[in-house]
Amino acid sequence: MTDIRNRKADHIELALKPMHQSQQTAGFDRLCFEPNPLPQIALNDIELQSEFLGQLVSAPFLIGAMTGGCENGELINQHLAEAAEASQIPLALGSQRAALEQHKQQDIRRWAPSAIILSNLGATQLQQSGLDLARKAVESVQANALIIHLNPLQELIQPNGDRDWNLVLEAIENCVSKLGVPIIVKEVGSGIGPTSAKKLMDVGVNWIEVAGRGGTSWASIELERNGSERERDIAAPFIDWGMDTVELLPAVHSACPSLGLIGSGGVRHGLDIARCIRLGATMTALAYPFLAPALRSTEAVIDKISVLQEQLRWAMFLTGSKSLSELRHAALQQKLTI
Ligand code: FNR
């Protein structure tokens, strides 16, 4: 148990280091909007409000999953939850496994009584402990939905990580049919591609968070934590494993047009959020960009949210998009090949 708490504390410390951002970009720089110097709209008339899980949110992004149970995590969660409440932005919690195994109170609702809160568990925990754990995760924070994370590469590199991934899809299907709240399935930085997205859709999953390559690199973080030279040797070629967020979004969107799609993995500012929306995402999620503000204060997180909102509004203004549905059809620049 203490191991899990130490691991989470390590993760926060290491994730802050810029060296653990992927050496590959998420591909956002390759996607340029055609500038529209005749926007024919007023900046203040631009509407960012959107609907997510049947509730209105102030903009189409959420605070990505980071912390569930460690001492530092509690303060981070307080700052994130208070900011989510004040700014009407959903908050995804990090894995609740440690907190649940320790029967720890997770009273996140005292800071965020009305914000959308997303529970979080790893897929292999469900395969081991089933529906019960999922129910506890959701009930303990009165969550609006459960996120199940898929992280096979991270588990391979992590000392003592889970290496038996049998019956994971069946465990997800069981949650979908019996849990009674929406299920969102996400990766952690290698991406969910169209083939897996289809399998998930076929068992009833309605939401996918792609979490593609190009942002926080869990391979890199776990490599730093793994002291075994042999395991580090084996893992080395997989450091950039995955697909870019910019490739994944259109691929999953065209393979599974009815899926709710959350663009994530390397989303760093409001222009990237606009790019995700243009590529078919309904929502976007950012983890790393919220980590440093979350360590500081609630106000720092609120400021970060407001900067992201303003950047998204600028991107919409500069493409002449008054609404998110207009942004979905904004003209893209053809990159010159000469
Ligand atoms: C994460 N991430 C994560 N994801 C998850 O589903 N459960 C978790 O417990 C965690 N823990 C975690 C801790 C920290 C410190 C970070 C930075 C991230 C992964 C996260 O939600 C996201 O998918 C990836 O980090 C990619 O997004 P960014 O960081 O590039 O925006």
Image (spheres, rainbow, N blue to C red):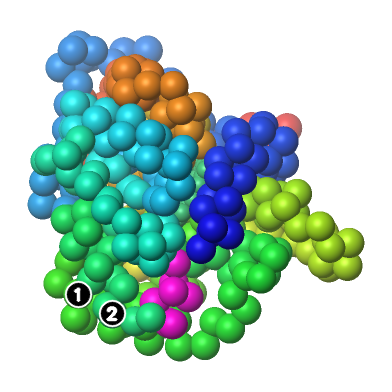
In the shown orientation, is residue 19 left or right of residue 303? right
Residue in view at x 37 percent, y 21 percent:
297
Q: Residue at x 32, y 63 (%)?
A: 103
Q: Secondary structure at mark 1?
A: loop
Marks 2/1 in contact by CB < 8 Å: the verdict is: yes
Q: Residue at x 21, y 27 (%)?
A: 87
- Callout in the foreground (2, 1): 2
Range of residues picked out in magenta: 120-128
Image: 97 above or below 189: below
- Quarter of the rendering containing residue 167: bottom left
Residue to which mark 2 is pinned: 131
How packed mark 1 is, by other alpha carbons closer than 10 Å (few <14, some 14-19, many 20 or more), is: some
The quadrant in which the C terminus is found is top right
- How many numbered circles does the render carry? 2
Amino acid carrying label 2: it is: Leu
- In the figure, is residue 286 to the left or right of 54? right
Q: According to the image, label 1 marks what residue?
A: 179
Q: Is 264 left, or right, of 239 in this rendering?
A: left
Q: Residue 212, how many percent across, how many down?
A: 53, 53
Q: At which x and y percent is residue 31?
A: 52, 36
User: Looking at the rendering, which quadrant does residue 204 occupy?
Assistant: bottom left
Can residue 16 be spotted in the picture?
A: yes
Magenta residues, dominant SS class: helix
State the residue in front, 243 or 137: 137
- Residue type beneath disc 1: Leu
Element under disc 2: helix
Residue 199's tag is none
Rendering coords of residue 68 (x, y %): 40, 51
